[in-house]
């Protein structure tokens, strides 16, 4: 009986030592400090811009070719002003001129930004970070496999109105653009990313 009890105690101490080694190794390799001076990280900003560019590339602009337009852009987030200038610049690149306040336009165009955001989800196989009971010490995450998926998503819709009468002329189908930036961790120490931020505007995640 005493021999079996001592064997159990020795086994428990062995497993405790293994867990402690894994935790200390993870602490030395996975703890990092992220410093930013902006409201969004550079990756999040690029995800928003790429998805917006890609949704614009899918808009049907046939009726606007060679026209001078009044442009109004509407959105539900604070990115609306930036989006308007980016869309105006892209329209100019396509040969569509955005009229100044003192100029007479051929048609009125309203672009609605139905969505412009970054969605994130993650999955973890391993031990999540936690606070050790009694001593209150934080224990870092131990990731055998971890995936953090970041998806930029933009949806645009364009409405055209007659400049003189104000009557509705037509609207485009909704145009959707996406971008991705995914972060992976394997066996605690191996880290890599997969993204399409530098691919051409026409690229679209399937």
Image (spheres, helix red, strand yellow):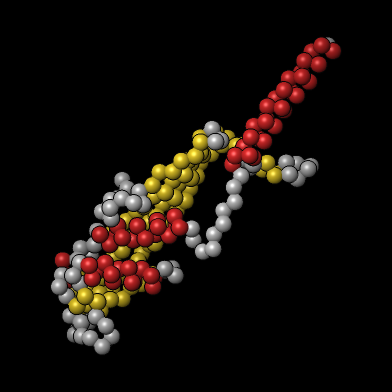
Q: Is 118 situated above or below 63?
A: above
- Compared to residue 161, the image places residue 7 above or below, namely above
Rendering coords of residue 85 (x, y %): 33, 72
User: What is the x, y in percent for residue 33?
Assistant: 59, 51
Residue occupying the point 28% across, 65% down = 157
Relative to residue 186, is residue 151 drawn left or right? left
Taking 89 as reference, is 141 left or right?
right
Which residue is at a point 82% across and 11% down the rendered structure image?
A: 3
* Relative image position of residue 124 (x, y in whole percent): 53, 39
As drawn, is 110 to the left or to the right of 75?
left
| Count of number-bearing discs | 0
Tell me the quarter of the image containing the C terminus: top left
Q: Residue furthest bottom?
A: 102
Residue at 16% across, 75% down: 67
- Image coordinates for residue 182, horizontal then vertical, percent: 43, 45
Q: Residue at x 22, y 67 (%)?
A: 93
Q: Name the quadrant of the N terminus.
A: top right
State whether residue 55 is above or below residue 190. Answer: below
Q: Is residue 3 visible?
A: yes
Question: Which picture quadrant has residue 28?
Answer: top right
- Residue with the most extreme right position: 2
**Can residue 108 be seen here?**
no
Quarter location, residue 75:
bottom left
Along the horizontal axis of the image, is 205 left or right of 126?
left
């Amino acid at each position: 009986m005493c021999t079996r009890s001592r064997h159990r105690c020795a086994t428990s101490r062995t497993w405790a030592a293994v867990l402690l080694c894994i935790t200390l190794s993870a602490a030395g390799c996975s703890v990092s400090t992220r410093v930013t001076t902006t409201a969004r990280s550079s990756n999040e900003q690029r995800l928003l811009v790429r998805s917006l560019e890609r949704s614009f590339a899918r808009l049907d602009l046939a009726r606007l070719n060679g026209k001078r337009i009044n442009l109004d852009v509407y959105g539900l987030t604070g990115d609306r002003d930036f989006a308007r200038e980016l869309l105006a610049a892209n329209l100019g690149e396509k040969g569509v001129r955005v009229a100044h306040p003192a100029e007479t336009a051929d048609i009125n165009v309203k672009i609605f930004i139905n969505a412009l955001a970054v969605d994130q989800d993650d999955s973890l196989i391993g031990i999540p970070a936690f606070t050790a009971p009694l001593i209150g010490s934080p224990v870092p995450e131990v990731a055998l496999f971890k995936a953090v998926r970041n998806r930029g998503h933009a949806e645009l819709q364009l409405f055209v109105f007659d400049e003189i009468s104000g009557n509705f002329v037509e609207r485009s189908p909704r145009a959707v653009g996406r971008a991705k930036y995914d972060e992976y961790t394997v066996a605690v120490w191996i880290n890599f990313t997969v993204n399409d931020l530098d691919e051409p505007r026409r690229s679209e995640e399937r």
